[in-house]
Amino acid sequence: MPEHREWVEALHQIVRQRQTILPKRLVGPAPSPEELSEWLEAATHAPDHGRLRPFRFIFFPPQQRDKLGQAFARALRERDPSASEAQLQRAHEKALRAPVLLVAVVDAGPAETEVGVHERLIAAGCAIQNLLLSATARGWGSALTSGKAMSSSALRELLALGPSEQAICCINVGTAQQHRAVGERPSVRDITQTMTDAGLVDGLGRSNTA
């Protein structure tokens, strides 16, 4: 569609500009509530087999970050009862860095379900990418962070997770103190294969079947 060429070029530019900015390098000012709502609306357009909405996002405003930090510290103590106060403090501080922080949660559903956990995770990943690209389009820096705390009883309790739910990552957004050059990405050939009569070949090769 030639009339959409500018949209396509803009989209490709946004995709190529997205990069991980570590939370410690994300500072204020913070995005507005209206922008945050815009990103979350973009997340709702992710592919979603069966319209199950197998993902949700939990927003932690600044005044609630201490609760998350305490859960991170408790999670560390669960894993390592001998953790020092300095280590516990560092775990706590992970919740306090970026101006905006959300926790992404996925619902794996019952053990026997038509829409399996892999599809649900893909839906959640697409929703997260939509959110990140929306933030990038507005000029914000972002990063995903995770770790063993995501599976801790401390975090499950804080987030009131259901039996089939799992926290999968934190989404951190803010003003990037500095942008680094975007790292080298794999080529199309590196990530693509084509099925031919002779078997798989690397890249977008042509099938030798008419």
Image (cartoon, grey):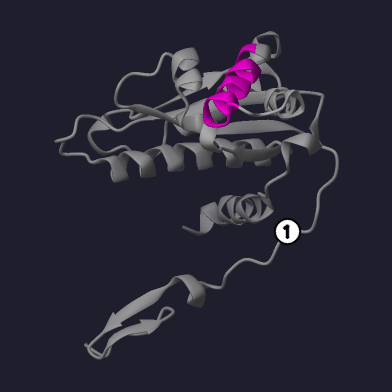
**Quarter residue 208 falls in:** bottom left
Is any atom of residue 201 visible in this view?
A: yes
How many other residues sit within 10 Å of disc 1, few (<14), some (14-19) or many (≥20)?
few
Is residue 16 left or right of 99 when viewed as pictured? Answer: left
Figure quadrant of the C terminus: bottom left
Q: Is residue 45 magenta?
A: no
**Secondary structure state at the residue bearing disc 1:** loop
Q: Position of residue 61 (x, y in %)?
A: 65, 13
Q: Nearer the viewer, residue 147 or 41?
A: 147
From where the camera sits, is residue 38 visible?
Answer: no
Q: Is residue 9 left or right of residue 164?
A: right
Q: What secondary structure characterizes most of the magenta part?
A: helix
Q: Is residue 52 left or right of residue 11?
A: left
Residue 64, compared with residue 153, is above or below; it is above
Identify residue type, mark 1.
Val
> For the magenta stretch, what is the residue range?
67-81
Q: Position of residue 128 (x, y in %)?
A: 50, 37
Q: Image height check: is 155 above or below 47?
A: above
- The residue at which mark 1 appears reads as 182
Q: Residue 197, position in %: x, y?
A: 22, 88
Instruction: Answer left or right for 153 relative to 147.
Output: left
